[in-house]
Amino acid sequence: FNGGFRFQDAGGGIFLDGRVAVPLRTGAASLVIYSNGRVDVGTWGSEVTMTPGVVAVLQNLVPMVDHGQVSTAATYNDSRIWGSTLGAATVVARSGVGVTADGALVYVAGPALTARTLAESLQRAGAVRAMTLDINPEWVTFNFFSHPNPADPGVVTPTKLYPQMQRPADRYLGPTQEARDFFMVSLPPS
């Protein structure tokens, strides 16, 4: 799935494999990946911090859901805090990620969401802490990849989460390098 805003707009930083590419900011909404595979989302400096087990941190804006409550800043018509949209519309494609009380990862995306409806959707999906990822139809992407033939794992079938996503389902497979950040979640064969 897609990452967050460009760093000039994200109000936060990135840390990956021991390197700080853009300085991390206290108070920023942060997706944190640990060496044991655990993922967390929280406010940097309070709910999540740098520890020896942190492998990656991506920050984007401020929390949308914190302590199970939707942020009062997540309104139906804001374009200041939650980013500029195409045509200054407040109802656009948006995506977000959060964690439940028991640590499960929650992803929400849709073709017609406000900042408020995205935050409410994350909360309804069980997120106790959540952040926005990206906005506008060009950037919101979530693809499933399956291996239909166990004898040939090189064959991959990509599928979009919903058909209105503008980027192709094989967006992250290459051979062209992807210019935007993204996350990949792998599950062991069943």
Image: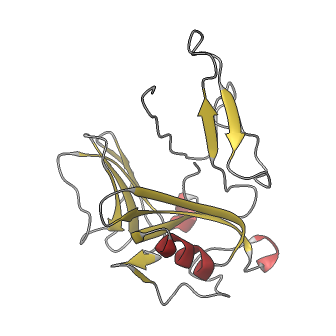
Outermost residue to the top: 151
Residue at position x 43%, y 77% from top?
A: 65
Outermost residue to the right: 87
Reply above or below: 2 against 132.
Answer: above
Outermost residue to the left: 52
Q: How many numbered marks appear?
A: 0
Position of residue 170 measured from the top left corner of the image (x, y, whole percent): 70, 34
Position of residue 74 measured from the top left corner of the image (x, y, whole percent): 54, 84
Q: Nearer the viewer, residue 76 or 78?
A: 76
Residue at position x 63%, y 62% from top?
A: 109
Q: Nearer the viewer, residue 28 or 115?
A: 115
Residue 139 left/right relative to 38? right
Position of residue 107 measured from the top left corner of the image (x, y, whole percent): 52, 58
- Residue 105 visible in image: yes
- Residue 11 visible in image: no
Colouring scheme, one of rainbow, by chain, secondary structure, one colour:
secondary structure
